[in-house]
Amino acid sequence: DVQLQASGGGVVQAGGSLRLSCAASTFTFDHYTIVWFRQAPGKEREGVAYIKYGDGSTYYADSAKGRFTVSSDNAKGTVYLQMNSLKPEDTAIYYCAAAESRSLPTPRLLFKIPNLPRLFDFWGQGTQVTVSS
């Protein structure tokens, strides 16, 4: 089975930073797109940041622009989400998910698709991020 492992969550004060990591244990990210999602209590799971592993192109939801940075370390087969200037409303469980890039539209269209999570085949277990005010 394909497995993704997300880590790096924690408790941080507003204005602080965290870096999340997502590693694949049984496959490589080549030809895949990885999206970081988050789900707050009582809310739908939403896409936050996108990276296409092959060319490194990135895209961010409006809530993440200017504060979050998604990147990849090809040598380590790991995708990161650097989160700065964290706000209490960023509190959620964060998931990384992967799908074959050829199956996805451009990120601008992708992030407008209803029920976006259904397009992703492989999921990490989630890591809790809590931002205190």
Image: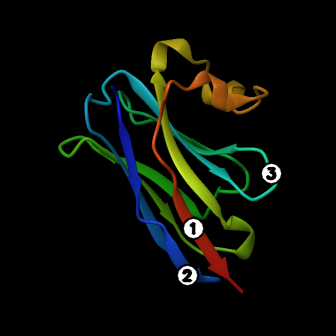
Determine the residue located farthest toward the front in the rendered image: 1
The type of residue carrying mark 3 is Lys
Residue shown at the point (75%, 29%) measured from the top left: 115
Q: Are marks 1 and 2 in contact (CB under 8 Å)?
A: yes
Distance, label 1 to label 2, CA atoms, is 8 Å
Distance, label 3 to label 1, CA atoms, is 15 Å
Check disc 3: other Cα within 10 Å, few if <14, some if 14-19, many if 20+: few
Residue underneath mark 3: 43
* For residue 132, side relative to residue 100 (left or right): right
Q: Which mark sits nearer the N-terminus, 2 or 3?
A: 2
State which mark lies toward you, 2 or 3: 3
x, y (%) of residue 82? 46, 62
Q: Quadrant of the C terminus?
A: bottom right
Q: Is residue 92 above or below residue 112?
A: below
Frontmost residue, 115 versus 41: 41
Determine the residue located farthest toward the left in the rendered image: 75
Residue underneath mark 1: 129
* For residue 55, side relative to residue 65 (left or right): left
Can you tell which quarter of the image residue 119 is in? top right
Q: Is residue 53 above or below residue 127?
A: above
x, y (%) of residue 9? 48, 66
Residue shown at the point (38%, 40%) measured from the top left: 4
Residue shown at the point (35%, 27%) measured from the top left: 54
Residue underneath mark 2: 12
Q: Is residue 91 above or below residue 75?
A: below
Q: Are marks 2 and 3 in contact (CB under 8 Å)?
A: no
Check disc 1: other Cα within 10 Å, few if <14, some if 14-19, many if 20+: many
The type of residue carrying mark 2 is Val
Q: Quadrant of the N terminus?
A: top left
Q: Is residue 129 above or below residue 31?
A: below
Q: Which mark sits nearer the N-terminus, 1 or 2?
A: 2
